[in-house]
Image: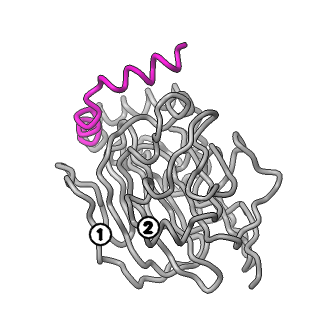
Amino acid sequence: MKAQLFATMQYLLPKHGLSRLMHALTRVRWPWLKSLSIDVFLRNFKVDMHEAAEPDPYAYESFNAFFTRTLKPSARPIAADADAFVSPVDGTLSQIGIIDDHSMLQAKGHQYSLFTLLAGNEELAQRYRGGSYACIYLAPFNYHRIHMPLTGILTTTIYVPGDLFSVNLATAQHVPNLFARNERVICDFDSSQTRFAMAFIGALFVGSIETVWAGEINPIPRHKTIVQLDKGRGLQLNKGVEAGRFNMGSTVIVLVECDRMEWNNSLQSGSAVKLGQRLGTLKTS
């Protein structure tokens, strides 16, 4: 009942306005406000600062800098095998499996359309129809940079305007088509082994989504229509390098072409994963 009430209340909230406010507040550099915000956060969430390149949480210039902190190079070893498809983030697997024709499981009793997730892009939808997908939720305490699950060449970046519902489990269980209705950035890649894509899903209080090749993609004020970006096209990014970040937390959905992936059978909905951990094995041609 509490989960349903939380989801229902979000329909009434000025979600974009609250996210604009959060964008501003998390970048304030007033020492007292920045330190207070970080202190409140640390009291409510267990954050392992020993993994951070800068372990002192109060040394960051703003709350956003603290939230998007880098890790020590040794903190997340990347599975080096050429056939290893690795997790692009730290988080919890919401769902993992095979795309049933054009549908993916959001939560028990809820599915969403691949075609809608990809903003009606027929070429991309046909590419990943019947393929593999994994949906990974990033909690507030997680590391919030997104890395490459496989070496690939960027073919397109698409910004899709949308709503900003929370993407936690409670909302996923009660808001239909959640990931296909929220604001998102879709990044498609080509590799020597397969085509794959990542969808960075916006959410309540997510001030912005950034990529390393285009910077902050969802500006303030937001774009009103779908925007296909040319910047970065043709850029090769190696497995494990940073691809982008969430300025506040959200969800990443990875897509892989049909019959190219064998997911690790020990992984299931609710499994915790770490950046660089093998999610699956790519099949040889």
Q: Look at 54% across and 64% down and name the residue there.
A: 147
Q: Amino acid at mark 1?
A: Gln
Q: Quadrant of residue 265?
A: bottom right
Part of the protein shown in magenta: 1-25
Q: Look at 48% across and 83% down and name the residue there.
A: 236
Q: Is residue 168 left or right of residue 95?
A: left
Kindly give the residue lying farthest to the top in the view shown. Answer: 1
Which one is in front, 106 or 129? Answer: 129
Q: Quadrant of residue 14?
A: top left
Residue 51 colored in magenta in the image = no
Q: Is residue 80 left or right of residue 222?
A: right
Q: Secondary structure at mark 2?
A: strand
Q: Quadrant of residue 245?
A: bottom left
Q: Amino acid at mark 2?
A: Cys
Q: Which residue is mark 2?
A: 187
Which one is in front, 162 or 113? Answer: 113
* Residue 244 tag number: none
In three-dimensional space, the C-alpha distance between marks 1 and 2, rounded to whole angstroms, equals 10 Å
State the image coordinates of residue 196 (x, y, percent, origin top left).
56, 71
Q: Look at 61% across and 33% down and name the residue there.
A: 109
Q: Which residue is mark 1?
A: 228
Q: Is residue 29 left or right of residue 210?
A: left
Q: Look at 39% across and 66% down and name the residue there.
A: 121
Q: Main secondary structure of the magenta part?
A: helix
State the image coordinates of residue 35 (x, y, percent, origin top left).
36, 34
Label 1 packing within 10 angstroms: few (<14), some (14-19), many (20+) = few
